[in-house]
């Protein structure tokens, strides 16, 4: 099992990098050269919500310093609007601008094309994908417990 586990962890890392490559290529194809793949993915994760920055970190999407830098850059480039919460001045709420919504629309269309292409290959059923996602969520939970309690 150790060999398979190690292969799985490396595959997850490679898949994430490859997905960022796919996003980068799509952004170049549509002429969005001022934003990188990580920032585009951040916009897609925010979507149509108005969200507190802290929630992105708590959901496990990003590390604090990483998200802070990218939020700052996205605000400067006109992809995000931010405002301080009237109830807690330390809390900053963010939302996408129309410019950002165009990027998210592009990503959603890419995801649709990729999903159709993947399902068209006939290698995995929807049930197979659900089982795979369930296994990956179990792995994520195991890792979260390892971080929380210091053991696997």
Image: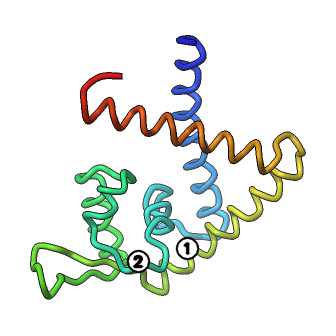
Q: Mark 2 or mark 1, which has the lower sequence index?
A: 2
Residue at position x 89%, y 45% from top? 122
Left or right of 66 on screen, residue 114: right
Give the answer, above or below, for where 135 lies relative to 33: above
Disc 2 to disc 1: CB gap under 8 Å: yes
Residue denoted by label 1: 103
Q: Residues within 10 Å of mark 1 (few under 14, many from 20)?
A: many
- Residue 79 bears which disc, if any? 2
Q: Quadrant of the C terminus?
A: top left
Residue 19 rendering spot, x and y as whole percentages: 60, 48
Q: Residue at x 64, y 61 (%)?
A: 26
Residue at 88% over, 46% down: 121
Q: Is residue 50 above or below residue 31?
A: below
Q: Identify which residue, 136 or 122, lies in the foreground.
A: 136
Q: Secondary structure at mark 2?
A: loop
Q: Residue at x 43, y 62 (%)?
A: 42
Q: Position of residue 126 (x, y in %)?
A: 78, 51
Question: Label 2 neighbourhood size at 10 Å, few (<14), some (14-19), many (20+)?
Answer: many
Front-most of 94 and 37? 94
């Amino acid at each position: 099992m150790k060999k398979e586990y190690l292969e799985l962890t490396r595959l997850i890392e490679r898949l994430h990098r490859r997905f960022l490559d796919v996003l980068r290529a799509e952004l170049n194809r549509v002429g969005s050269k001022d934003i990188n793949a990580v920032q585009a993915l951040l916009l897609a994760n925010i979507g149509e919500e108005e969200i507190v920055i802290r929630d992105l970190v708590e959901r496990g999407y990003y590390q604090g310093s990483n998200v802070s830098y990218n939020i700052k850059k996205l605000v400067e480039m006109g992809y995000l609007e931010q405002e301080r919460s009237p109830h807690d001045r330390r809390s900053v709420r963010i939302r996408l601008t129309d410019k950002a919504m165009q990027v998210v629309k592009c990503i959603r269309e890419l995801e649709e094309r990729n999903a159709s292409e993947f399902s068209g290959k006939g290698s995995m059923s929807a049930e197979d994908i659900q089982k795979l996602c369930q296994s990956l969520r179990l792995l994520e939970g195991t890792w979260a417990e390892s971080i929380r309690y210091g053991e696997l």
